[in-house]
Structures are given as structure tokens and as C-alpha cells.
Amino acid sequence: MLIDYYPSNSFIHSLDVRTKLLGFLIITVAAFVFLSPFINLLIAAITFLILLTIKTPLHKIKQVLKPLLPIFLIMLLITGFTYPAEKFQLDLNKQILFYLFPDKTLPISVGGIFYGLTLTLRILIMVLASTVVTFSTPIEDIIQLMQKMKMPYQLAFVIATGIRFVPTMQKKSEMIQEAQKARGTEFGNKGLIGNIKSYIPVLIPMIVDSIRMSENLAISMLNRGFGTYKSATNLHEIKMMKKDYAICLAELIILIAAIWANTENVGVL
């Protein structure tokens, strides 16, 4: 559900798509500049607050984050047990908390836990920042941006349409699963091979429905003269306003400050 658009009158919605993309890039760079999980936690909290300001339904945020929790746990454990303690600069992070085996193999260090938290927070920040952009940006603005980057509008339309249909197909998948469950199909309790086989009754209707949707879309596009002209016009042109330039300047200042702080060894492990 990362590419749903939710109309709102929030300040983020009123910004140009280029301003939001620049903000996404700078937030991502800032997350990778610092190794400290505390600084990345602050960045993640700020990004989450921005996500709340665009009035995104909380259950949608939960749907975005819930599948990532097992990945976060696995990354935290692997990093904690495998990252060498001697590579950390601070003495606190070199301390060994305990060993996984009695023969003192696979030690887990304070720094390993901190570095694992940093990696998980980086992924969380990118997910939250990209969610802010996609939840607050109409697909038409993304198409216009692609056109301004000299991409043929036919290709831009294909890419944007493919993105747009991801949540639609996900909803159809959920509907098919519910229908199959009503017919007695079980999911998630047959082992790896059994689970793969159990999704065949979902996959086949999805493929058939996807082909039908693509044919209907192609007929509709032909009836509207799609491809007749080399360029396309837009109902609302994206345009940078004064507030966009001010926000972009602030974003660049934040980027410079983050790089400077990194050169001063702020947030090292």
C-alpha cells in the first residue's frame, strides 16, 4: 500500500512533487550519514510526525510497517552476532554482552546491537519518507515529472499506470483469498511447499483478471486517441512556488549540516 494517494489540504500535499522527492533523498542520505541509532531514531520520529500531518489513516501506516517487523528482527540478530566488536571506535560499543555458545563463539556486542538498530532504522526511514511522498502526490504529478525529464509520455503513462494498479491488484488478491477461504481453502499452515500450492487458486484468477483489465484499458486508451500526438497536455501543470524554493533551500541546508556533522565524527559508533 505504499503507492496509494490520499487527498488532503495538508501543507505537504500543497508542495511540488520535486520538493517532496528532494526531501526524500535528503532524509535518506542523512539516515546513511550517521551510524548512531539515536540520531536515526530522531530522524525516523520526525519523518513519522510528517506522515501524521498529511492525515494518513493509522491503519494504512500499520499495513506498511507490519510486514517489515520480521525483517527488522532478523537484521538486528544477524548484525548483533556477526559484526566484529573491534571495529567500533567507542569503548562502550566494544563490550561483549554474552556469547551464543559456551566456547565463546558468536559474541553479541553493544555496538553490534546499536549497528543493527541503525540498519533497521534506515530502512524504516526510507519506507516512511517514501510513504509521505506517495500518499501526498497524485499519480498525474509523477507522470508530469517524468515528462519534464524528457521521458516519452507513453512510457511515463505505462510506468505510472503499473504503479497505480499495484494497490488495485492487492485488493483483488485479498478479495480472492477471502472467497477461496469461504470455499474451504487454507492458507499459512501447510509448510513452505504446501503454502505455495495453496496460493495457486489465488494466482490463476489474478492472472486472468489482470489480462482482462489490461485488455479493457487498452481498448479505452485507443478509443480516446492515446498515442495520436507525440506529446500530451495536462489539466494541471506542476509548478514550483515560493514556498517550494524555500523548503528546497532548507532541505539543502540540512544536508550540508548533516555532512558537516559527519566530518566532525558526530554519531559515530
Image (cartoon, helix red, strand yellow):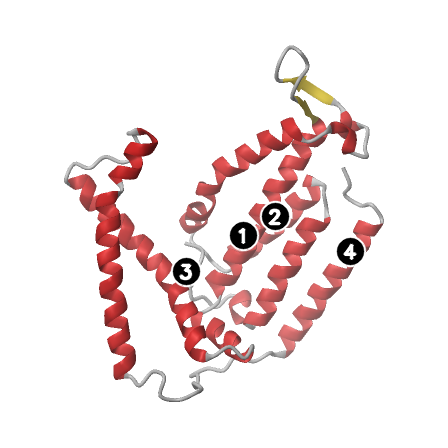
Crowding at mark 3 (Cα within 10 Å: few <14, some 14-19, many 20+): many
In space, the residues marked 3 and 2 are separated at their CA atoms by 21 Å
Crowding at mark 1 (Cα within 10 Å: few <14, some 14-19, many 20+): many
Mark 1 or 4: the one toward you: 4
- In percent of width and height, residue 79 lies at 63, 32
- Residue 15 visible in image: no
Q: Quadrant of the C terminus?
A: top right
Between discs 3 and 2, the one toward the N terminus: 3
| Mark 4 lies on residue | 259
The kind of residue on which mark 3 rests is: Asp
Crowding at mark 4 (Cα within 10 Å: few <14, some 14-19, many 20+): some
> Residue most toward the bottom?
229
Mark 4 or 3: the one toward you: 4
Residue at 77% over, 27% down: 94
The one nearer the camera, 12 or 239, is: 239
- In percent of width and height, residue 210 lies at 27, 60
Relative to 39, is 215 on the left or the right?
left
| Mark 1 lies on residue | 128
Relative to 266, is 105 on the left or the right?
left
- In percent of width and height, residue 247 lies at 66, 69
In space, the residues marked 4 and 3 are separated at their CA atoms by 33 Å
The one nearer the camera, 220 or 215, is: 215
Between discs 1 and 4, the one toward the N terminus: 1
Residues at discs 2 and 1 in contact (Cβ within 8 Å): yes
Residue at 30% over, 38% down: 196
Between discs 2 and 4, the one toward the N terminus: 2
Q: Is residue 43 above or below residue 149?
A: above
In space, the residues marked 1 and 4 are separated at their CA atoms by 22 Å
Crowding at mark 2 (Cα within 10 Å: few <14, some 14-19, many 20+): many
| Mark 3 lies on residue | 4
> Residue most toward the left?
183
